[in-house]
Image (cartoon, rainbow, N blue to C red):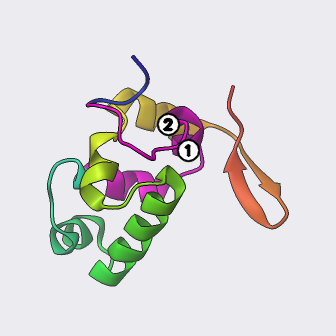
């Protein structure tokens, strides 16, 4: 079993690698989506606009190669994995930032 809960989502890329590419803000949104919270609820909790939540969620869906927020929530990592990923060193490659897997 990998660092996700729930069944595999058709079309999902390698989960561990894909999750390592998410920013801390995207991980926060993904964690709350997995709790079935609406974009407006997430926005209130994080102190950001719901438009920002939706933008982050669209990027999460793109990185994880899933079609919906519900598919993204199904491969949401357990809290320990979120904490570990958030602490990984970030490298800049071609103007983009990636977490280096250890």
Which quarter of the figure has residue 25? bottom left
Q: Quadrant of the N terminus?
A: top left
Q: Residue at x 55, y 36 (%)?
A: 14
Of helix, strand and loop, which one carries label 1? Answer: helix
Q: Quadrant of the C terminus?
A: top right
The answer to whether residue 23 is visible is no
101 vs 87, left or right, is right
Of helix, strand and loop, which one carries label 2? Answer: helix
Q: Residue at x 34, y 83 (%)?
A: 51
Residue 13 sits inside the magenta stretch? yes
Q: What residue does disc 2 label?
A: 15
Return the x and y of residue 29 as percentages of the image width and height. Answer: 34, 58
Residue span colored magenta: 6-31
Toward the front, the furthest residue is 10
Q: What residue does disc 1 label?
A: 18
Q: Are marks 2 and 1 in contact (CB under 8 Å)?
A: yes
């Amino acid at each position: 079993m990998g660092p996700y809960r729930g069944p595999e989502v058709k079309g999902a890329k390698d989960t561990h690698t894909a999750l390592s590419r998410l920013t801390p803000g995207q991980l926060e949104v993904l964690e709350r989506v997995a709790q079935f919270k609406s974009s407006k609820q997430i926005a209130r909790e994080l102190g950001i606009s719901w438009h920002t939540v939706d933008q982050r969620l669209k990027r999460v869906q793109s990185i994880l190669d899933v079609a919906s927020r519900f598919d993204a929530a199904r491969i949401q990592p357990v809290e320990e994995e979120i904490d570990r990923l958030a602490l990984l060193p970030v490298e800049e490659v071609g103007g983009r930032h990636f977490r280096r897997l250890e």
